[in-house]
Amino acid sequence: MPTLPLPSDYPQFLAELKGHIRETQVRAALAVNSELVQLYWRIGYQILQRQQQQGWGAKVVEQLAQDLRQEFPEASGFSPRNLKYMRAFAVAWPELAIVQQAAAQIPWFHNCLLLDKVKDPAERAWYVQQTSENGWSRNVLAVQVESGLYHRQGRAVSNFSRTLPAPQSELAQQILKDPYTFDFLSLGAEAKERDLERGLLEHVRSFLLELGKGFALVGSQYRLEVGGQDYYLDLVFYHLRLRCFVIIDLKMGEFKPEDSGKMNFYLAAADDLLRHPTDQPTIGLVLCKSQNRVVAEYALRGLSQPIGVAEWQLTTTLPAELRRSLPTSEELDAALGVSEPPEA
């Protein structure tokens, strides 16, 4: 039997239908997660109340876990360990309304990770918000917490408050960090700036993750012709939220006042040669191995272009060689016979 020809608009119809189905699946998964997290909070809250009012001990929790697993064998979240997390969750988030607005928007074991690693409530809430906005996996969240992102965000020295309008200046300040952590790189003592640039491009996904949401790579050693002479910019990005180009100048040594003058020149040229009429002013970031913040503030004070200065570092704790030789937390758990309940 011959196959009838499909309507000409069928491919577009199919693509739109697939999109609607995926969106619905995502919304359904988020709704299920939200209900699960709220259920766990209610269980934890009731355990906490009875411990405080009736003196429930660990044996009661063990028995509760056994009875719940017997009643709901298909559910995987009622281990003694997970019940303890539920109690800790209720302690960390004492009001259900706040849980519904914040913590219920990320998966349960993301919340467990934050309970383990972040003790300050404001900092924990910030990581919840960032995870929700950026769609971080649990591994990515762990990296961001361990690198101290909360304490690094918005700390770069800049002149944005004087060179950009208020809404743009505040947002630009928040996207810059100090220091930037490039733990994914292995650089020797004799490495040059081109080695740093090459390493960042070889690990561009990790680099973009460290830069933060919204950065799109335009090019490296980007050529600008000014007055018949060629100038090459180390790295050029476009920031989708700021709606502007971002130029990064890499330095293997300490920040020097003349670095800001060079960047000021680059930005003036980029605004004339790259910037579209609808773009916001181009922003510059001088990334250096070290800096004196007072010197950086003076160097930026009289400049008309928006520039930030921040440090980069390879690690905040152990050398990469030593860290690679140590067991991971998962390997330690396995060696000790500790298993994490699967995500429900």
Image (cartoon, grey):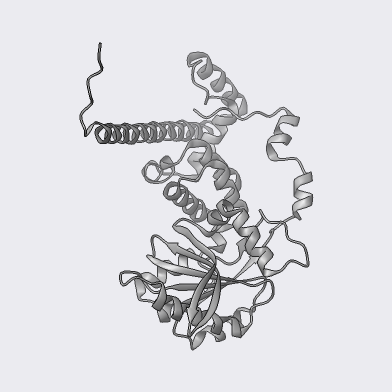
Q: State the residue in front, 76 or 30.
A: 30
- Quarter holding the N terminus is top left
For the question of whether residue 190 can be seen, the reply is yes
- Image quadrant of residue 81? top right
Instruction: Kindly give the residue lying farthest to the bottom in the view shown.
Output: 302
Q: Is residue 12 above or below residue 202?
A: above
Q: Is residue 294 above or below residue 170?
A: below
Count of residue discs: 0
Identify the residue at image location x=46%, y=30%. 43
Residue 234 percent location from the top left of the image: 57, 69
261 with respect to 241 (left or right): right
Residue 329 percent location from the top left of the image: 69, 39
Identify the residue at image location x=77%, y=62%. 188
Q: State the residue in front, 24 or 337.
A: 24
Q: State the residue in front, 340 or 72.
A: 340
Residue 197 percent location from the top left of the image: 63, 64
- Image quadrant of residue 273? bottom left
Instruction: Kindly give the residue lying farthest to the front in the view shown.
Output: 2
Residue 295 percent location from the top left of the image: 61, 84
Instruction: Kindly give the residue lying farthest to the top in the view shown.
Output: 1
118 with respect to 3 (left or right): right
Q: Is residue 8 above or below residue 236?
A: above
Identify the residue at image location x=48%, y=14%. 71
For the question of whether residue 52 can be seen, the reply is no
